[in-house]
Image (tube, grey):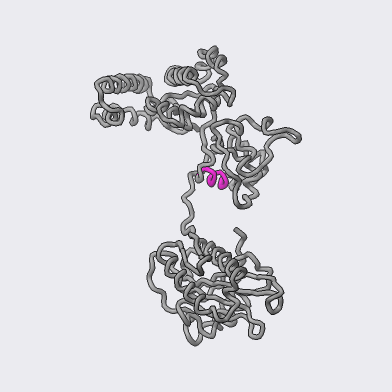
Amino acid sequence: MPSGLESVPSRSRAAAFRGGAQMVAAPAPCSGLGLRALLCCIFEKDIGPRVVCSDPPDAVGKQFKPLGRYLLPEDIARGRVISVVLDDDVVLGAPVYIDDTRYDRNCFQFVICLVIGSREDTEPHRDLAQHLAMSFHALEVEIKLLSRGEKVPHVQSILASLRAQLNACEEVYVHVTDSHCIAFQVRHRCPALAARPSLSQVPVPLVDLASLLDLPCWPAGGSRDDAPEELRLPGCSQPPPLPFEPDVTLLQMAPLVDGVRSVQDIVQESNMDFNVVLICLQHLLHFELVAVIDAIELESRYSLTPDFHVAFEREEVSAEVVPYVTGGRRETSVELLNEVQVLYAGMNGWDQTLGEFQKERERELSALDISLRHFITFGLLKGFLEPLHQALSSEQLRERELLQGIVRETKNRLLDQGLPRVEVNRVPEVKTLVTRMNALKVQNDVPQR
């Protein structure tokens, strides 16, 4: 989205627009965008900018003419959003300039303006101004909708439909001709971004960012086979390229998001501002392009969650786990799937560190070509592994371990009795045990300093 160009008159200049008729009719309460008016302004050869129609009709009095120089300036404003503040109103529009020898002055200039209250959030309305500019630009190029005087009543009816629909539901579908329409949706509210990751956390790509952004993330003269291992994993999906030019910050940062570098590493190696990197990561988290995990170290401890009992029954887990944990060196088979599941079942952070687990299972890990870092990362991303920070006392640790065994035995007994798996977790006995386990988990999950 092009950056906006603000044009705000001084208070003395604004005062010149006050006398006489009110600029906009009194606003009616609405549940959508709250548009007070829509205006269609064109530049005429003899008289300059002129409002040819509006909704509501006669929304603008004679005071509009001095505004023309702000809302239809020279083509330096092409592709930008102009906003003018007038007392309690804000007028926004994205000027359109169509170069064609068929027009007087070899150019046709127009702007579709929207009028809102000065206390409204302007961000969605700037987005709307761009949508309107693109829609009416296409209609003018294809059917000369705005440059023909006989079509003014049609344009006015289109503005009325647009305003009514946008004030109702923030999206529009307006029939123009048998082969033309205006249809779009406005992003009214900014997304609620995820919490900022800590400097020690590690962003893990959930999609192939290099493919998404069309970045060459391998050495010059090399191929995709030379790319970082994380970007060639089968579990890393490859979406189609973006339909727009991505942010420069994202382009510079994306090659560094490899599942190994921490946030601190990315900030240092990218030579970008700390806050800019964090905001970019928040957006990647919001759109589920990355996830963040704590750094994986041999001194860390990990334990299975209750989800492990059903995790391998999920199709996405059983299909992805073998290629992921082996770095793409092995394909899925029933035998390998069972062996990987057995390895996960042996994770017991209450009794051993990750380094001790690696030493104990070194032969199996080597025989299966398993990368320990991918092994832990996959379990964390799928939710059946969790880090332990050892905030519990030795008695509470023993209680937690005892409860895990009791829950497992109770669930197996209920399943053997023919109770459906979905109903097992609803049995009061199981719910009581799990509630106590979760209480211990919350007490144990104290962030490391």
Question: Residue 86: percent from the left, percent from the top?
Answer: 52, 76
Q: Viewed as shown, does residue 99 lie left or right of 404? A: right
Q: Quadrant of the N terminus?
A: bottom right
Q: Depth check: 127 or 194 in front?
A: 127
Q: Depth check: 90 or 237 in front?
A: 237
Can you say whether 235 is above or below 278 in the image? above
Which residue does the image show at 60% across and 51% down from the upper left? 243
Q: Depth check: 146 or 70 in front?
A: 146
Question: Residue 397: percent from the left, percent from the top?
Answer: 37, 21
Region in magenta: 278-285
Looking at the image, can residue 343 be seen? no
Question: Residue 116: percent from the left, percent from the top?
Answer: 48, 70
Question: Residue 65: percent from the left, percent from the top?
Answer: 58, 82
Which residue does the image show at 53% across and 65% down from the upper left? 179
Which residue does the image show at 50% across and 42% down from the upper left? 288
Would you identify the image quadrant in which residue 112 lies?
bottom right
